[in-house]
Structures are given as C-alpha cells and as structure tokens.
Amino acid sequence: MTYFIDVIVPIPLQKLFTYRITEAEATFLQKGMRVSVPFGKTKMHTGIVHRIHNEGPTAYEAKDIHQILDETPLVTEIQLKFWEWISSYYMCTMGDVMRAALPNAFILESETMLTKTNVKLDETRLKDDEFLVYEALHHQSSLKVQDVMQILDKKSVLPVIKRLIEKEAVAVEEEVFEKYKPKLVRYVKLSAHFSSEVRLQELLGDLSRAPKQRDVVMTLFSMAAKTQKPVKVSELIAESGASTSIIKALIDKTVLEDYVIQTDRIHYTGGANAASKTLNVHQEQALSEIRTTFETQHTTLLHGVTSSGKTEIYVKLIETVLETGRQVLYLLPEIALTTQLVSRLQNYFGEKVALYHSKYSSHERVEVWNNVLQNTAKAQVILGARSSVFLPFKALGLIIVDEEHEQSFKQFDPAPRYHARDAAIVLAHMHGAKTLLGSATPSLESAFNAQQKRYGLVSLKQRHNNVLMPDIELVDIKDKYKRKLMRGHFSDRLLEEMAVTLEEGHQIILFQNRRGFSPIIECNTCGHATQCPNCDVSLTYHQYRKQLRCHYCSYHTAMHKQCEACGSPELDNKGFGTEQIEEEVKVVFPKHKVARMDLDTTRGKYGYEKIITAFEQQEVDILVGTQMLTKGLDFRNVKLVGVMNADTMLNFPDFRAHERSFQLITQVSGRAGRTDTRGKVLVQTYNPYHNILQQVASNAYGAMYKEQMDDRFNYKYPPVYKQIKITLKHKDYNRVEQASLWLAKSLRQVFKEHVLGPESPAVARIRNQFYKNILIKIPKDQSLAKTKKAIIRINNSFSSIKEFRSVRILLNVDNY
Ligand code: ADP
Ligand code: ZN
Ligand code: ZN
C-alpha cells in the first residue's frame, strides 16, 4: 500500500499538493501536523497535513516529504474546517488562509530570512549543527533557510532552525525591527550539595564568621520553605537586605546556584482577582435577556448606548463560561482599545487573560498559540484583534465582538479578505458556542439581522449611574465664517466651551478625521498640488518632518519652498489635519497640555499606551485625535468633545458614509461625561440641517436605521443585496482597461444588470499599478454559492487568455 498526504502550503495555489509518505510516517502523521516539503527544483515549504490517503495524483508524480515537524497537531480539526469555510466564502486559497492564520515563526520556508538575535547566549548549550548555523550568522547578517541547507549539507534543516528559534539564538526576519527583548528572570537556590540537614548545619557553622552570608542562606531557606516556589534573586535581595555582591560571593563559592526560567512575556503581575461589579437594574435586565435569547439563538446583538456598562455585562457572561471550563474570545476592533480593557479584565480574571495581536512578535504569538491549543490556565480569555479568530481553540464557549460596527474587523488586503465578526459567528457555530455582538451604534447589517430575527436583540438605553446622554450642539460654521467668528478652525462657541471646561479642571477631546498637518498644499497662483510619482493622489504635508508624504505608498519628499509648476512662493494649506488642530490649540491655550493621537504618534508597540495613560492620569488636558479616539475608550474626566468638521465624513463617496458618520460622531460624543456630570459635545459643520447630524443630536438610532435602510433598498446596497468586488490591476493602463471590459462583458452575460463597471477607483494608480473595479450585486434570492461558481468559471476563462494572464485579479466578498 502506498500512502499519500494532501498538504496546504502558504502560497496562493488553487489546489492542494499531494506528497508520498512511508507507511511508518502514515501511522505517525495526523491532520494538522506540519511537514516540510520540497517545492519546484530547489524550494522548500512548511505545509499543514490536510488529508492522509492512498490515492496518488494523476497529473504529476508525487514527491517525498522532507520530514515531519510536529509530534502532535498544531492545527485542530475545527480550525481546518474553519479555514475551508474562509477559503470558500471569501474566495481565496487555503494557502492564503494558512498564511494569515499561523504566526510567521511556524511557517519557515527556503526564502525565510534568519537573523541573529541580541540575546546573550551560552554557546555551550548549542548542539554541533546548531552551532554551525549560529556561527555563520556571526559572519553574515542574515541567512536564508536554503543557505542553512548548504551549511549543514542536508535538506532536513527545519528541526535545527526550530531549536535555534526556541533557544532564541536566531529569529525570523519579521522580528528584526520588533527589537524583541526576552524577559529572563534570575532565580536562586541552594546547591544540591546542601540539601541534607547535616550538610546544611555544617554550612551554617562554616559561615558563622560571615554573618551577612549566613543571613542570606537562612532567609533563602525560610522563603523556599514558606512558598514552595522558585525564589527570584530580586526577591532574595529584598527579603534579606543583602547586597548583590554578597549574593555573588555565595554563588562563586557554589553555596548558591543561580538559574533562569523563561517567563512568559505576556505576564500579569497585578494583585489578586477582584470581584466583578454588581450590575445595576438595567444591566441585570439586559443580562437576563441575553441569556434567554441564547437559549434559542446562536448570536445576539446587544445595542447599549455609550457608557451603559456593556463591558460589565460581558464580564458576567465570561465568568459563567469560565466556570464550565470553556474558553472565551473577546474581539476588539483595534489594539488602541486593549490597553484599558486588558487591565479591566485582568482585574477580574488575572492571569487567565491573554492578548493576541499583530504588534506582538512571532515569539509572543507562538506562546499564545500554544497556550490556547493546550487550553492552559493562561489562555482562558483571549483578547485580540481580528486575527485571533485563527487561534487553535480547544473548547470555545463564547465569542464577544465588542464595537461590532467597526470597519477594522474587515481585512482588505491581502487575501483572505475576511470580516472577523462574520467569521467569528461561523467559528462559534463550529464550536457550539454563542456570539454576542455589542455596540452603541450597530452596523446596519447586524441591526437588519436582528430585525429579521436571525439574531437575538437586547437593548440597553440607560447610561450607568443614570448619567444623561451628552448634550449635542450643532455649530453652523458657514455662518460663523461669514460673521468672522472663527479663529483658525475653531468657532467662538467651541472656544468658549473649551475655556469653561478647562477652568473647571475637566478634559477635552477634539476629533478631526484626518491625520497629517494639512492634506494638500496647493499653489495659490496656478492651483498646482504636488502629486505622488507612483500613485494618483496629491501628497500630504506633515509639518513635524517638513515633508510631503503619500499615504498610499509611503513616498516622501522635502516640502517645497516654491510651486514646482510656476515657481510662485504662495503655497496654501487646503483642508486640515490633526497636527494643525494641535498647533492652533497650543496657541489659544498656551498654559494647557495638548497631545495628539493618530497613526503618526502611535507607531511603536506602546505608542497608544503612553498617550492613553497620560490622558487618563490627567497629565494632558486636551487630546486631539482621529478615528482611534472613538473606539470605546473610557475616560473619567472628559467633559467636552469637539468635532472639528463633520462634513468631510458626510461627503465621503461611499454608500456607507452616512451610517459611518452617525457611528463616528455618536461614538466620539460618547467619550464625554461618562461618570457623573452631563457631557457636552459641539459638532462644527457647514450643514447643521443634515438629517444625519439631526439624528446624532437627538440620539435617534431608529430614525437613522429606517432612513438608511430605505436607501439601501432603493439603490440595491448591502445588507439588502450582497456584493462582490472584483479588482484588476496591471502596470499597463491599456491592458487593464481591455481586460476589465472583457471581464465585465462576460459577467454581464450571466448577471445582467447586476454588474456595475468597470470603473476606475478614486485613486486609479497606486505604486505604479493601474486599477479597475467591477461590482457584482447579488439579490437575496440568488444563490451565493452558485454566483461564486459562475465567477470562478469566468475567471478561469479569463486567465486562459494570453494577453490577460499578467493582469492580477483580486476578489473581495462583502467588500464594505
Ligand atoms: P460601555 O462599554 O457600555 O461604553 P462601560 O462598560 O465602559 O460602558 O461602563 C462605563 C463606566 O461605568 C465604566 O467606567 C464602568 O466601570 C462603569 N460601570 C458600568 N457598570 C457599572 C456597575 N454596575 N457598577 C459600577 N460601575 C459600573
Ligand atoms: Zn503654481
Ligand atoms: Zn504613492
């Protein structure tokens, strides 16, 4: 009998590859284990075993695998099922899903770059082959896995590399700029030699002339006896009051031995678990309704106004699930939020809380992965951004999707272009778990699903402590400009309220939906604005670095002194960003501290943390920021929120612009007055009679929902219709134009009037590639599966046309 396995490799291939294995390997291997496999003439990939069988491929001769990399499956059966769902629903390959799902350190391949870490290493701990690789990295800054094959003169090098990674002698490429610092804690114990009572007494006798050393030994002895746990060097120093040199002397005499334990980096050092809060009557009511809906529904939407205490309700639900020994996944739209939430949850659940997101290094992600897979005590509540739906849950009981309306749950690039909220619901289903979606401003699709009774619906209308909803005032800046009542971008009303708020010792948030100083610099004489050489957009001015930058491709150049086109020195700022607001505030309120939170100021791993903490601790009086500010942050002392300009959001060319504006402004308003006194919100706009602004001001979610749904219905938009976007790109404009016309025509033969385009997007060229979009609308009664099949069929004929072969096609299901 010949044995074969189908292997998922992390590259976009339509089909899985089949390899031959021996009978012994067949008995050992299980689905979900990793194998390293040859690919092409020289390449090597790490793959995941998907199926073990006896059917050799007919189209090609199966190669042998290099070797097996795991002793137990790294990926669970449920995960493989989940990957299949993602791949089929979002029209991407299993390889795409694998790449998104696994931490990089798990998928070494011949092209993976290895580098030396900065960790000080005891070289004697390395085996011979490990040392050869380590040594080579002293002469060369990086090595590819295939170089390692040459150095060791064999193909099966991954186990060696795996051990080197575990010993932290080498790192995979991505970690280089993470500046990853391992946390090595030094412990100390009495040498084994003194473990008997007799020898210990002898030792104490010998040390009678060195009383300080004797003290240390006695202290260590009693500490170890008391706690039965390893004693840290730092603890011993603190407890005994001895200096480090005394401890060193004892170590040198081999009375004491020091050693290190690799502690988990994601380490919680807080106090004991606090009891969760007693819910108020409204929360109590909502909680019991949620439990009731869960009896009949898989998914429930909790629509609770800002500061109604949704988080405390989640905590109660989490407690119940943990009692049954099952895991909880708590999804957040962005890590900006985790800083606050992590400490809130750790207060209740201590070490059981683990974090997972893309700013973590591979090492840290590997740690969390393994903890989740083994369902250890440290991985009971996983708090994470969208990619955490890919963790290897063993026994998932509940998924919470907080701020479910947030767009950042959707991955746009690269494939899989999945929506983490929707994927989470499917994942929960596979585990027999429940999903709770929470928001103060639910997405129309979730509200629609609830209205259609596909989800349970629970509403919470009171803020905790019965604090009033903030008082929202619309300020007509057209009128203010006319009457010369504007100072920079600030109306007299906003400045008045700011002065009062600061006077009373409260804090202020100013929201501006743009980063950078001033998006565009235009010549006053000829109207020229500097364009990016690679993309069809104007460059954005960043004052801090005195640079013009492209937000699409990161191209940048020094700010010009004169117009490039006509030489005029009169260059003017059009539009304004967070940086400019910050500048203006500093001038008006020079005595107060201003900070800014946007993509530019939060780059580092702890970027958010620093700003949020400074604001929480009231070191900062005024915080200027973008979107990031709107996401569920809980500040106690904010009394005033200013929305600098509501119109840019409202006028954004997207069918969701109105829904999004309602959500954004309501959410940012929700940061005001969360504790006792009522907050105040000023929304500056040219259009105070705009329906959306009126609805925001009167907190009328229902009216907004109804009006927007009418539009969606009339114009055939989601959630009434489904949507798939097809994007074509190529460096030659004519090629992409022809290809898109051909594709649209073929699609029209099947889908008729439900095909829109091809159209050039607003930014038609990015990184020197021209783009075309085609949109397919799918009525509710049309089978999604059949639609996708037809698209794939047409796609295949497309790729068989020679001139079109080099045109890249991207499929985006639910592209909104
Ligand atoms: P939401 O997530 O709905 O915006 P939060 O859960 O952040 O609201 O709650 C708002 C504030 O009220 C938080 O500071 C929270 O600690 C507090 N809070 C909510 N519920 C209670 C409760 N039952 N007892 C005490 N404080 C509460
Ligand atoms: Zn000019
Ligand atoms: Zn560019």
Image (cartoon, rainbow, N blue to C red):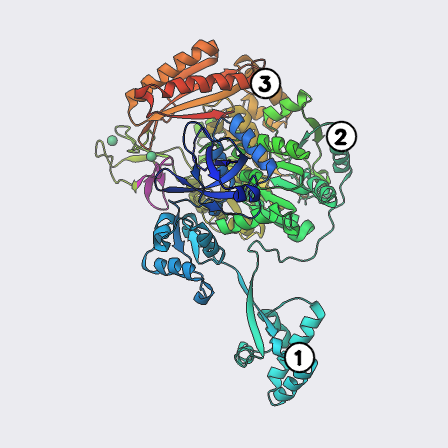
Residue 98 on image: x %, y % = 49, 37
Residue 582 on image: x %, y % = 45, 43
Q: Give above or below for 711 relative to 624.
A: above
Secondary element type, mark 2? helix
Front residue (pair 303, 720) = 720
Residue 647 on image: x %, y % = 48, 27
Q: Give above or below for 215 relative to 118.
A: below
Whether pointer 1 and pointer 2 mark residues with C-beta atoms closer than 8 Å, the reply is no
Distance from disc 3 to disc 2, alpha carbons, whole Å, reads 29 Å
Q: Amino acid at mark 3?
A: Met
* Residue at 25% over, 35% down: 563
Secondary element type, mark 1? helix
* Residue at 67% over, 58% down: 271
Front residue (pair 231, 538) = 231
Q: Give above or below for 39 relative to 608.
A: above
Q: Earlier in the sequence, mark 3 or mark 2?
A: 2
Kindly identify which residue carries mark 1: 218
* Residue at 52% over, 36% down: 1
Q: Quadrant of ligand 1?
A: top right
Q: Residues within 10 Å of mark 2 (few under 14, many from 20)?
A: few
Kindly identify which residue carries mark 3: 709
The residue positioned farthest toward the front in the image shown: 1
Q: Amino acid at mark 2?
A: Glu
Kindly identify which residue carries mark 2: 295
Q: Residues within 10 Å of mark 3 (few under 14, many from 20)?
A: many
Of discs 3 and 2, which sits in the foreground?
A: 2
Q: Which residues are magenta?
A: 540-556
Whether pointer 3 and pointer 1 mark residues with C-beta atoms closer than 8 Å, the reply is no
The residue positioned farthest toward the bottom in the image shown: 209
Distance from disc 3 to disc 1, alpha carbons, whole Å, reads 75 Å
